[in-house]
Image: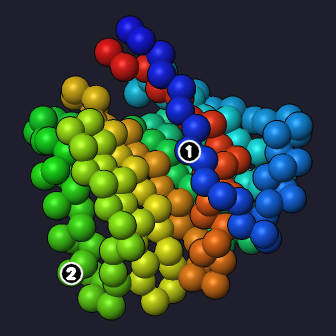
């Protein structure tokens, strides 16, 4: 197995840039998932609350008032669905349920898709990786009036996973 770390980096927005800069020297907390072979390090000063799913498939990180959430989890792909089909199914269902929503950008590759989308209340960032018989999903959800915080949150997380 090869262990691949990745860190998503983008320009830091003003509101959280101080906290994100401080996070590089602050002690980070971590969560590792042995079933789906991923780990995440996060800064508790930015996302101080968290809960692990009952079945230990992932973790949800929250801001103090829970208006910002980050979900990182795995799931089995029992149908062996390719990335493009997973993306089309997700966006199709999301668009039906959010007719006022729109996609800001999308990237679809054989091993993952990445999409940012918006509705009346929230902006979302989602990245889904396919790994043989399972998938890893990483999603950030922020209120529309705090949408600039997505980049600072992405900068504050260090997610790594194993490739088989």
Q: Is residue 85 above or below residue 132?
A: below
Camera sees residue 54: no
Position of 48 compared to 61: left or right? Answer: right
Residue linked to disc 2: 96
Q: Which mark is residue 79?
A: none
Position of 49 compared to 104: left or right? Answer: right
Q: Which percent across, then down, holds residue 89?
A: 17, 61
The crowd level at tag 2 (other Cα within 10 Å; few <14, some 14-19, many 20+) is few
Say which element carries label 2. helix
Residue linked to disc 1: 8
Taking the spot 71% from the left edge, 67% from the top edge, the residue there is: 13
Taking the spot 53% from the left edge, 67% from the top edge, the residue there is: 141
Q: Is residue 136 above or below residue 138?
A: above
Identify which residue, 132 or 8, lies in the foreground. Answer: 8
Camera sees residue 92: yes
Taking the spot 66% from the left edge, 77% from the top edge, the residue there is: 146
Q: Nearer the viewer, mark 2 or mark 1?
A: 1
Q: Is residue 151 above or below residue 123?
A: above
Quadrant housing the C terminus: top left
Q: Which percent across, then down, holds residue 59?
A: 56, 44
Q: Earlier in the sequence, mark 2 or mark 1?
A: 1
Taking the spot 71% from the left edge, 60% from the top edge, the residue there is: 12
Q: Which percent across, then down, holds residue 129?
A: 33, 39
Q: Is residue 160 above or below residue 20?
A: above
């Amino acid at each position: 197995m090869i262990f691949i770390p990745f860190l998503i980096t983008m320009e830091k927005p003003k509101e959280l840039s101080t906290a994100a800069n401080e996070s590089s020297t602050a002690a980070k907390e971590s969560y590792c998932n042995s079933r789906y072979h991923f780990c995440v390090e996060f800064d508790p000063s930015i996302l101080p609350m968290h809960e692990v799913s009952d079945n230990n498939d992932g973790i949800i990180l929250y801001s103090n008032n829970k208006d910002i959430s980050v979900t990182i989890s795995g799931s089995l792909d029992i149908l062996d669905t390719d990335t493009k089909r997973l993306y089309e199914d997700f966006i199709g269902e999301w668009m039906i349920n959010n007719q006022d929503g729109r996609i800001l950008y999308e990237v679809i590759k054989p091993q993952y898709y990445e999409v940012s989308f918006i509705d009346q209340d929230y902006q979302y960032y989602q990245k889904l990786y396919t790994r043989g018989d399972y998938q890893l999903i990483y999603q950030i959800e922020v209120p529309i009036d705090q949408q600039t915080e997505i980049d600072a949150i992405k900068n504050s997380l260090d997610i790594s996973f194993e490739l088989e």
